[in-house]
Every structure is written in C-alpha cells, then in structure tokens.
Amino acid sequence: MLNKNKSVARSFFITTMGCQMNEYDSDFLAQSLIQSGLLPVDDPGRADLILINTCTVREKPEQKAFSLFGRMARIKRRKPDLILGVVGCLAQQMGEGVIKRFPQLDFVMGPRELGRIQEILEQIYSGRTKIVATGLEEPPPQPTACRGYFKGRVTSFISIMEGCNNFCSYCIVPYVRGREISRSPEEILIEAGNLIAEGVKEITLLGQNVNSYRWNEEENGDFVSLLKKLNKLGGLLRLRFTTSHPKDLSDGLIECFADLDKLCPHIHLPFQAGSNPVLKRMKRGYTREEYVERIAKLRQVKPDIAITSDVMVGFPGESKDDFEMTLDLIKRVQFDGLFSFKYSDRKGTLADKMGNKVGETEKSFRLSILQDLQKQITLKKNKNLEGKRMDVLIEGYSKKEGQLKGRTGSNKIVNLICDTIKIGSLVNVIIKQGFLNSLRGELT
C-alpha cells in the first residue's frame, strides 16, 4: 500500500499505444493502482499520475509516442507535483535516454518491471528521484483480482507468456520484451475464472509467440493442453489467441479448431513476405510453400475458418519480383484481412544494418498496390456472407447511432438494430450487407 503520509497521487490516467498486449499491461497497472487507493480519471489534466504505455515495433507508433510525451510534459509544467511515467517497449528500448530527451518524466519502466509499480511510486513519493527500471529478468507478474474492474466488459485478454526467442532480423521484440517465459496453467485458469465471474464471455490469450507456450516441459504443459483446459470452463462462450508463428503451428493445434467448441474459427498467422529469399533474410524459419501448406491444413480441418495476417513491404533487398511473390501469395491464400505496413529500421536489429534499402517512395507505392488488392479480397469475402446466418456476440454500442455492435466467431464486426438484446448476449443473425470493414445484420 502506498504511503499515505506523503504528498502522493490520488488519481491516475493511463494512455495506451500499440498492441493488445499493451492493453493487457495497462489493465494490470490500473488494477494495481486502484488496489493502492488511487482512482482512475478520463482526463489527464485532472490526474495526479499519468502513465504512457508505449510501443516501438515500428517507427510510426514511436513517433506518436514522442508527440504524446510533449503534450503530457506541458501538463506537467502546469502541475509540478504531477507524476509522469513512461512504460512499455519504447521505455525498455530507450531507458534513461527517454528522460534525457524529456526531463519532465519521473520514471521509465519496461514491460518486465510492471509488478514493481507500487514500489517505484513509493520511491518517487519519498524523494522525488527519477527512476529507470528496465530489467528483463523478472517473470510476468501475476494479476490480483480487482473486484468489479471488468464489470460490463464482454471481452478481455490474458497474457499467457512474455517475450520471444525467434529473433527475426527486423524485430525489436526480443530486445524489449526479453526471452520467452510462460505462466503456469494454474495462474492462467485462476485469471480466467476471475474474468468469467466478472461477466466476461470471450477471452483472448496473448503472447508474442503464443503457440510456443510451454510450462516446465510437463507432459501436458503445451499450448494445446492449455486450450483444452480453458475450453472446459463454465460461463466462457468464446476463446481466441494471438499472435501465432507459422513455424510453431502444429497439427495438434490445427486440430483444436475442429475439436474445441469454444475456440473461435479465426487465426491471425503473420506471413510477412511471400518471397523465399526475403523470408530467409528475415530469419522467419519457414518457406512460402510451408506457409501455404499450413493454410491448406487449417481449411481442411475448419473450412469456414477466417485467416488474417501481417505483411510488410520494402524489406531491405526486396526486389520487384520479390514483391510480386508477396502479391501472388495474397491472391492464393485469399486472406480475410491484412495488417500491412512499410518496413522501418529498428535500432539494434540485424535488418537495421543491412544494405540495399528500398526507398520510401517505392515502399509507399508497393503498400498502396498491396492494400488495394486486399481491399478487393476482403470486400468480396464479406459480400459472400450476405444471406448467411451467423452467431454474433454483442459487445456494445456501434459508432452508428441506434445500433449495437458485435463480432462473429470469425472476428468480423456486425452492426444491427435491436432494442431487446442485452450486451453480452450471443445471438443468431442473418447478414444483410457486407462492407469493407463490417457487416450489417438482422436478428433471425
């Protein structure tokens, strides 16, 4: 418990940038602070403590973070007693360098240090000293249930592992999240039970390489065994996981899509490039042929499975022929959706030191072509769903006034009008219209 005899923060504001893992980490921090007696506020100008949870996987979120630091520093100048901290991957990567660039910051804390948030705040309150906590030795912290925190939420996340051992040549994750370390099945099941007790209906399991989950080499300590245990939990309607690595997608995991009734028919399986020479330089550990073979097995086991992926353009040395191979793979696989982006150097990675870089103009040109192709595929797939009946989990209100929003098991957004449906309900709808980014449905 924080020392109440000091002049300490009574309210906090957390802003989250980047991936689902960061959202999970922000929830962990928020619960820790609430249990210490602090109250969340939705306006940083009213907060006594501001935390900025950062991402550094690509250049764009990094630049957004720097811009946000500047805006929050202006608040600090108006409120000198405000505690301002940066957490997450950018904090881990830059360490003390963040404070040198933004001296208004009070502390920097990496992803593996989140369990020390109360200790770090105590030190700041005691001496207003600046703290840099960027160790990578700590295991992922075990969340403690904060009663009522998840009330009203339909979906939530559980981190089952932290870090990555793959060291893809372009990726900063192993350097800022550390090596792979898994949480015990018992901890994960307890956390899932707490979420279900709060009313959560759908859980997404998170990890930088989630399907390499392994607990202490136990016979039943692999990812497939964990999925089977979670599938038995009463009150849970749906189970998802992300992100998967193609080289670790085992036949046993593929079979889970047929065998486990709560496992949603959707997988996010990044392929990154469609050219074998590029994949080799990326150190991805598979070929385009092996990737396509994994997709074929998934669709054989679960014909209606939705497949989404990550892809980049302009990796060092990517020729026009290499890029055409990426387009060809997209046409062959027919993804439901793609997260596509331009390669950007990440300091400290192998790719950062590679020559034969592709120019920004060419990268932008290639990205535009790729995205136009995927838009056509996605729209066609969504149009093909018109007239079909699908189960939709209602998550909340749509941005469109008077409508509810939910998702299919295949992770497609559905908007519908109905005054009698409760949020958290699983309803059957008929798809009336398919658009690029969503579907319109009606109750059957």
Image (cartoon, rainbow, N blue to C red):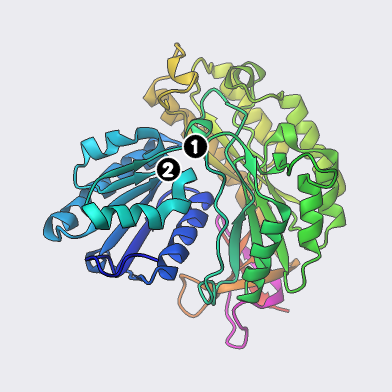
Q: In this view, does 28 lie to the left or right of 274?
A: left
Q: In this view, does 164 lie to the left or right of 128?
A: right
Residue 385 quadrant: bottom right
Residue 236 quadrant: bottom right
Q: Quadrant of the image for the N terminus?
A: bottom left
Q: Residue 117 location in percent, x, y?
A: 40, 54
Magenta segment includes 182: no
Answer above or below: position of 50 versus 399. Answer: above
Q: Residue 121 location in percent, x, y?
A: 33, 56
Answer above or below: position of 408 versus 23. Answer: below
What residue range appears in magenta? 416-437
- State if disc 1 and disc 2 touch (CB < 8 Å): yes
The amino acid type found where label 1 is placed reads Leu
Residue pointed to by mark 1: 136
**In the image, what residue occupies the spot 40% across and 68% down?**
36
The amino acid type found where label 2 is placed reads Gly
**Relative to the observer, which residue lies in front, 419 or 34?**
34
Residue pointed to by mark 2: 110
Magenta segment includes 426: yes
* Disc ID at residue 432: none
Mark 1 nearby-residue class (10 Å; few <14, some 14–19, many ≥20): some
Residue 201 in view: no
Give the residue furthest to the top: 355
Answer above or below: position of 89 versus 280. Answer: below
Answer above or below: position of 381 versus 391. Answer: above
Q: Distance between the residues labelled 2 and 1?
A: 8 Å
Mark 2 nearby-residue class (10 Å; few <14, some 14–19, many ≥20): many
Identify the element where label 2 is drawn: loop
Q: Earlier in the sequence, mark 2 or mark 1?
A: 2
